[in-house]
Amino acid sequence: MASDTLAQQQMEKRAGIVLIAAAALALIVANSPVANTYHHLLEWKVGPVMPRFGQMSVHYWIADGLMAIFFLLVGLEVKREWYDGRLSTPAERRLPFIAAAAGMALPAAIYLLVAGHEPGLVNGWAIPAATDIAFAIGVLAILGRHAPPSIKLLLVTIAIVDDIGAVAIIALFYTAALDVWMLAGALGVILAMAAMTQFGVRRLWPYLLGFAVAWYLMLGSGVHATIAGVLAALTIPLGRGEARSSLKRLEHAIHPWVMFAIVPIFGFASAGVALDVGLHALGDPLPLATLLGLFVGKQLGIFGAIWLAVKGGLAPKPACTSWRQLYGASILCGIGFTMSLFIGALAFPDAALLVDEAKIGILTGSVLSALVGFAVLRFAPVISVADEEFDEAAEIFGSDQPDD
């Protein structure tokens, strides 16, 4: 078991590094002599004619096709954690839900406060509301013993709840005009997949076939096609307690492909922006609102919610953690990279300049959150079980010892 955990941590660390490298490469290429080739490649029309879109560009295939598999993995992880993991009881759900809700609401409020006076920018309110779990976990993995297991557990759980919120936002607020018949067909396929679960179908291929059909119909419906990935995942049998259930087998099979191929490809396709234009525009409402939402809104929302929940008796403070470590983890939640870039493209589909401005705010806010969060956790004292027991005794009997 320990070796499996160590291997998982090493994979998370490598995946975070690969994602960072892909984003850095995109910035280098987009500011090099081959920048035009980079952009032309992304806009190259390829593949069959698809409903609503016609022949899609490489960028659309990445955002609407490959990212549907990313959302399939998100759905698998959410279902497993909800029924058989970190979110399986009301007590375990309470603190992450409170923290994630505040960590989505405050960044959106800050964004609207800074940019909401311009009607053309209001649609980007959700850009700073998301956390990039791969990037954040990669930073934690690099920190090693300075990021205790309880901090990793809390951050991952908050990010999972955050993903649920982001999926709901995409479905409710970033949906184009609906084709009711295509949507009905997609939902019909999902219901048929759910029925297969009830009838005891455990082979994966019928579910994967259903996912592909539901994706095609959802693409033509106007609801973002990636939602098909989440809905399909929720129908796949979990088999609580089973080490090799259908869901766990699929999650294990696609996880490396998503983390080491799909997410870095999306990062490379989405992070490329001309820095001379971008840095000049950093003080404009859109990038500034995005930057402040991620770097300021996330840390204040999440840390403030955790502090109020613990002090108000709504949830216990995570074991063997100091308030400084909790603050550092809250800052890391401001790394919005993958999901923020995804929502930014949905918010301004016909305004390339606004998408680029959003990218500058996302990249700056994410880098600041990563660096400052890393520094806070790196220099925070590591709390042991003995320290935790001493703090509890001091709280009962009284002590002049400061709470770290």
Image (cartoon, helix red, strand yellow):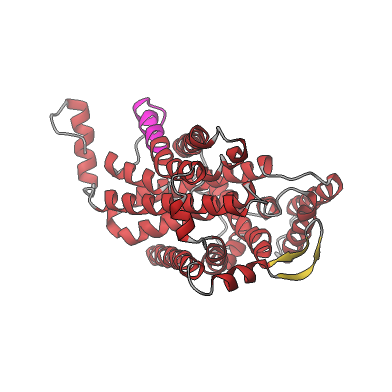
Q: Is residue 205 magenta?
A: no
Residue 350 horizontal/vertical position (percent):
67, 51
Number of disc labels: 0
Image side of residue 378 versus residue 243, left or right: left
- Comparing 74 with 63, the one in front is 63
Residue 187 horizontal/vertical position (percent):
79, 48
Q: Is residue 22 above or below residue 118?
A: below
Residue at the image point whose x is 49% and y is 54% from the top: 337
Q: Quadrant of residue 69?
A: bottom right
Residue at the image point whose x is 71% and y is 44% from the top: 175
Q: Which residues are magenta?
A: 302-315
- Residue 336 appears in the picture as rendered: no
Residue 242 horizontal/vertical position (percent):
57, 58
Q: Is residue 305 magenta?
A: yes
| Quarter of the image where the C terminus is located | top left
- Comparing 288 with 130, the one in front is 288
Q: Quadrant of residue 168?
A: top right
| Quarter of the image where the N terminus is located | bottom left
- Residue 280 appears in the picture as rendered: yes
Residue at the extreme left of the image, as rendered: 400
> Which SS type dominates the magenta stretch?
helix
Residue at the image point whose x is 18% and y is 31% from the top: 394
- Comparing 2 with 185, the one in front is 185
Residue 247 horizontal/vertical position (percent):
62, 58
Image side of residue 349 versus residue 24, left or right: right
Residue at the extreme right of the image, as rendered: 181
